[in-house]
Image (spheres, grey):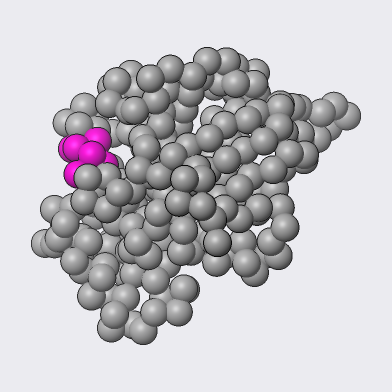
Amino acid sequence: MPSVHAPLVETRALARRYRSGDSWIDALRDLSLEVRAGESVAVVGPSGSGKSTLLGLIGALDRPTSGTVHLDGRDLSRLRSRDLAGVRQRTVGFVFQSFRLLPHLTALENVALPALLAGSLRGEALARADALLARVGLGGRRTHRPSHLSAGEQQRVATARALVNEPRLLLADEPTGNLDAESARTLLALFDELRGERQLTLMIATHDLEIARRSDRVVALRSGRLDTVSA
């Protein structure tokens, strides 16, 4: 059982190397970081600095080349693929810049899907999805498919989907990148409200200075390394 004082996220000497043709790319190098429960952290840096790679490793979407990721006291490198899937389903929620909604499903079905995959009964999953869509202001759009939703609406559906299993950690990769200014402000206000209501821990990879200003801490990466950390 993890200590109540332990960080929710802890990386130690984290590294991720990819092969590209005949050469190697060091996406992350020797990165150590702690994130406390309930904290909001903006991860900034130029394109190619390792922001998305870091979120993917913390969220158990990928495995490091070396180093460790501890999430809620568990060493992800020691977990089997089935257990990692459970971490992704129950502990972590993901919001992607490209939304990644399934085009043939309605907004309600898209939001309910992670709950169904985690073993919830259909009626329970749909009820939770319906409540979340209402919470993000899309109760009247539950039967619409993604092609009939604006970019801002699709991002709110994606956010509701990320929250349907009540994760402790929300990872958002450039969540405002495809949004207009008004939709971006609406989404950031929603993140703030959810943190207050649920003690949600939030990590956002971003180029958006407004997100950085609203965060508890800013973590800057450069060429795969930790550059600076500021409050």
Q: Is residue 188 magenta?
A: yes
Q: Tell me residue 21's x, y (percent).
A: 83, 32
Asked whether the viewer can see residue 183, the reply is no
Asked whether the viewer can see residue 124, the reply is yes
Q: Image point 60% across, 21% down: which residue? A: 226
Q: Image point 62% across, 38% down: which residue? A: 11
Left/right of residue 127 with respect to residue 55 in the rendered view: left
Left/right of residue 137 with respect to residue 94 in the rendered view: left
Q: Tell me residue 165's x, y (percent).
A: 37, 65
Left/right of residue 210 with respect to residue 205 in the rendered view: left
Q: Which corner quadrant holds the N terminus?
A: bottom right
Q: Which corner quadrant holds the C terminus?
A: top left
Vertical relation: 47 (above or below) 54: above
Q: Which range is magenta?
A: 186-193
**In this view of the protein, which residue sits in the foreground, 217 or 3?**
3
Q: Tell me residue 106's x, y (percent).
A: 29, 66
Vertical relation: 182 (above or below) 92: above
